Image (tube, grey):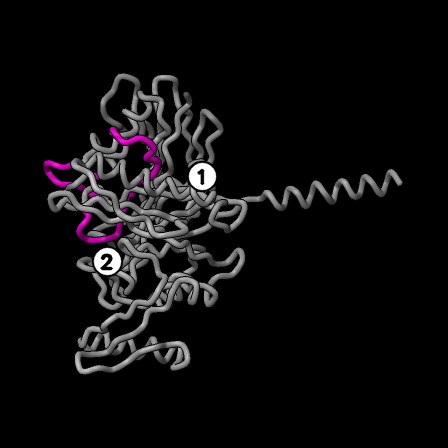
Amino acid sequence: MKKFLLAFLIILISVSAEAQEKKWYKGNLHTHSYWSDGDEFPEMIMKWYKNEGYDFVALSDHNIIAEGEKWKKISKDSLYQQAFQKYLNEYGEDWVSYKKEEDGLQVQLKTLEEFRPLFEEPEKFMIFKAEEVTTYLDKKAVHMGAINVQELVEPQEGFTIVELIQNNLDAIKAQEEKFGEPVLQHLNHPNFTYAIKAEDIIQIDGERFFEVFNGHPYVNNYGDSIHDSTETMWDQVNIAYHAEGKPLLLGIATDDSHHYHKFGAKWSNAGRGWVEVRSAELTPSAIINAMEAGDFYATTGVELSKVNFDGKMISIQVNAEKNVNYDIQFIGVRKGSTKSEILKSVNGTEASYQIPDDVIFARAKVISDKPKKNPYKEGDTEVAWTQPVSIR
């Protein structure tokens, strides 16, 4: 009997450990389709992401969720007419509802609940119900990702950029209380129309995520002679957040994909930026909880096999490719400083950094010399960013 109980206990422990084992899940949190200003049917988009090895995608069209009846007039341009024919050939007359009228071809868009079963598989692929809550103030754009919403979030107004962000953030997060489901909110492309400054984000209560990288050609990730890059903004915000005792702002990378038929630096294409999330399972709550815990990294192509922080030391290991060189930078801010700096740099595929007492927070950036395929900007190489951590 004792042997039986011991064997049962060993099996139980083994099963429990296996259930808790975490793995990396690849996902894009910013995707557009014909439901707003994208130029492709959602089914074709989801098929591309799934075939490319993504584990999850958020379909985040502007101020709309893919539900209800919506018809799309297809451009008479031969490129889009051919794309429709490809869609029709792929899914067939029984699936595609369309009508040819005097003013052109109209196609009824499939809802999320209709196309979701075509792609979702447990532990293989998941689609987030999402929205890009979109507002403007004097032609300055404030766009915010709302991931795992259960119903449409109506855009809120405000008299200042700070009010716009705060009011919409509060509206998005209110869905958590209403439905009891976690909602991930992220501030999108702050340098688009140069609408949002670090000083604005500093004043926000409850902002946890923003896009340090966005693949759209018009979002000004790198700033200019009079505007900070998004990466510089990130550190500036976190200097203030740390001083105020707020959780550090976390950075994501996204495609913000709109264009699926024309390719190049002037188009917003899929495959430019994503997140890798370490989670015990592929469910909305598990992915969001892992991201809120900072258990993820942002990337434009560099893959990491190890990202650890034990409370004092950051440890990084690159899943290296042949004939590619890597520079692992540990970037942070010293006490009393008003800007970030490279605290340590290692040329190689593995590095660690023990955060000293005089550094208030640090993060890692891995820069490869591998040219990015179809880059955001000509000359870009593949990069990854880990999340900032503090020893406080």
Residue 262: image location, x then y, percent: 22, 66
In this rendering, position of residue 277 left or right of residue 42: right
Which quarter of the rendering shows the N terminus?
A: top right
**Image-quadrant location for residue 49:** bottom left
Residue 41: image location, x then y, percent: 32, 68
User: Could you tell me which residue is drawn at 24 percent across and 46 percent down?
Assistant: 143
Specify start and end residues of the magenta stretch as a single range: 202-229
Whether residue 219 is in magenta: the answer is yes
Residue 38: image location, x then y, percent: 26, 62
10 Å neighbourhood of mark 2: few (<14), some, or many (≥20)?
many
Residue 128: image location, x then y, percent: 41, 54
Residue 350 makes an appearance in the image? no
Q: Is mark 1 on a helix, strand or loop?
A: loop
Whether residue 99 is in magenta: the answer is no
For the residue pair 22 and 197, the one nearer the viewer reads as 197
Can you identify the residue that label 2 sits on? 268
Amino acid beneath label 1: Asp
How many numbered circles does the render carry?
2
Which quarter of the rendering shows the C terminus?
A: top left
Can you identify the residue that label 1 sits on? 295
User: Could you tell me which residue is drawn at 29 percent across and 48 percent down?
Assistant: 154
Check if mark 1's residue and mark 2's residue have beta carbons within 8 Å. no
Amino acid beneath label 2: Ser
The earlier-in-sequence mark between 1 and 2 is: 2
